[in-house]
Image (tube, rainbow, N blue to C red):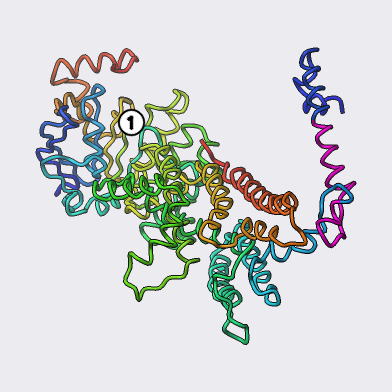
Amino acid sequence: MAPIITMERVRKSYGPILVLPGLDLNVAPGQRVVICGPSGSGKSTAIACINGLVPHDAGRIVVDGIALDHARGTAPDVRRMVGMVFQQFNLFPHLTVLENCTVGPITVQRRSRREAEAEAMALLERVRIPDQAAKYPAQLSGGQQQRVAIARALAMRPRIMLFDEPTSALDPEMVTEVLDAMVALADTGITMVVVTHEMGFARQVAHRILYMDRGEILQDSPPEDFFANPADARVQSFLDHVRRGEGPA
Amino acid sequence: MTLVMRRWTGGLFDTIPNAIVSLALLWLAAQAGGAFWDWAVTRANFDATTAEACARTGGACWAFIADRWRLILFGTYPYTQQWRPALALALFIALIVVSATPASWRSRPRRRLLGLAWLLTMPLLGALMWGGVAGLPPVPSRLWGGLPLTVMLASVGVGVAFVLALLLALGRVSDMPVIRVLCLFYIEFFRGVPLIALLFLAAILFPYLVPPDWTMDTLLRAQLAFALFFAAYMAEAIRGGLQAIPQGQYLAADSLGMGYWQARRKIILPQALRTVIPSLVNIFIAAFKDTSLVVVISMLDLLGAANASTAEAKWWGLYIEPYLFIAAIYLVFCAAMSAYSRGLERRLGVGVR
């Protein structure tokens, strides 16, 4: 099957710092990819390139048949098919939970308020916080906020969901509720690219686990292989860290 | 009861030195207050017909205000026609009050109705003020004055300035260098020139700068100068609010596929404006009071009209009363603006992180 995400020799630097020297990555429709690796390895930059939040310097990115071209302004077209969940939630603090989930559909997709609200309520139901719909983000716990962020992204009916360290900013007791929502989402068969260090989650839902270091993919294999046959000493040491429960530096 | 008192007097009487200072200040305040009461009420004169007669009681001469209030409130607008600016002012203030009420915005039909009210009222106000229609004798704008002029200069000026300031503030933080530099120049120019100089330029220099067949009402030119001037200040205040917005908000708006204006309208500006309400209201109040500077281009706003009212022979030598009178009017308007902004802050405070 033709890939839904194609990245070819994608290059990105921030000033003098080269983050991605030339990344190649294909994701098939319905595939769930987990990316892990030490901080500063370019994982977050890589997924932010997919929906153009970080403009790439060179190389080719095609998402669902649309070539991402910042000069030609195709980024908004790509973004409408790609939902994104951030480490810091980034909910809109001046809008209620429900409005957070309807502002995109109503403003960008010009859907009717009534229809957008009905769908948003169904999504909040799915992430198990329909009773918080009238509250403001500041009145919610971190785990609840992140689940709203998932619902907000899904409200745009995306074909692909990107997660950038969705549980890293959460207190430990709230990690599970967010991971549960993500596992439930995985069951729907949507394409997912997830940057995370939650190896239990990766083992449970991923089709492929990627290990990135210094902007390069050192290993790309199914979970069984990933844990059984680390391709590189760095992957081995990363796994040892994770197994010891400390997480990588 | 004592608890309530303690809350209000907290720290004023807790030690002996504090108590001494507090009592001394209270005594001074009582003295000053008593003297003012004596002058303004006890010995005031409410019915004399000349300044001389007034002076006999040795107190405030409110009889002067009773005699001249229409000149102070309406300036040189023809005496028999002064019901027109009075009605126009009342309608305008009512419209502003209704527009400022949150309930008027709550639903789309109400917002439409509000827009319609503005569309219908503005020409009506113009017809009332200018006349020349429906049997109303025409009154040229150079005869307008007093409170209606002050309120109009301030609110139309602030309204136009606000829209301009939004664009300037966004331009000032734009990714496009040309726009950024243009907005910077605009802001630096209009902030760097005294308002009085701008008013002179608008009134005197403007006719030389444009083709001779271009005519523009002095009032309109002053109005424009106000708007351009205060736009620069408001733009900087709004820019401060824009800078307070975390990068994540822009990313989240972008990730939903919002375009530039969609993100500004729905996500960025609502948050930015909320944080700058206090400084915007500060500028609104300053603008309201600074309308008095149009005196320099011989327009009789509230202050100018009060000034003019002192020039009459039989009331010669009276200054304090008209200035106190208009000070009270300015104070009422500014206090109303402050109170409204406090309410707005409280109402919009929900959901602050």
Comparing A193 with B150, the one in front is B150
Specify the amino acid type for callout 1: Glu
Q: Is residue A180 left or right of residue B87?
A: left
Q: In this rendering, does residue B75 appear at all? A: yes
- Picture quadrant of residue B311: bottom right
Determine the residue positioned at 36% across, 42% down. A185
- Residue A102 percent location from the top left of the image: 44, 53
Does the stretch in magenta take in B45?
yes
Name, please, the residue furthest toward the bottom.
B135
Q: Nearer the viewer, residue A27 or B133?
A: B133
Q: What is the total number of numbered labels drawn onto the structure image?
A: 1
Quadrant in the rendering for residue A234: top left
Prevailing secondary structure of the magenta residues: helix
Look at 68% across and 63% down and name the residue there: B73
Whole-percent x, y for residue B3 in the image: 83, 25
Asked if the magenta segment contains residue B349, the reply would be no
In the image, residue A77 above or below residue B236: below
Q: Quadrant of the N terminus of chain B?
A: top right
Relative to B316, B105 lies left or right: left
In the foreground, B306 or B104: B306
Q: Which residue is mark 1?
A: A165
Residue B287 left/right relative to B194: right
Quadrant for residue A222, please give it: top left
Front in this rendered view, residue B187 or A166: B187
Mark 1 residue crowding within 10 angstroms, few (<14) / some (14–19) / many (20+): many
Q: Residue B166 in the image: x percent, y percent?
A: 41, 52
Chain ID at mark 1: A
Magenta range: B29-55
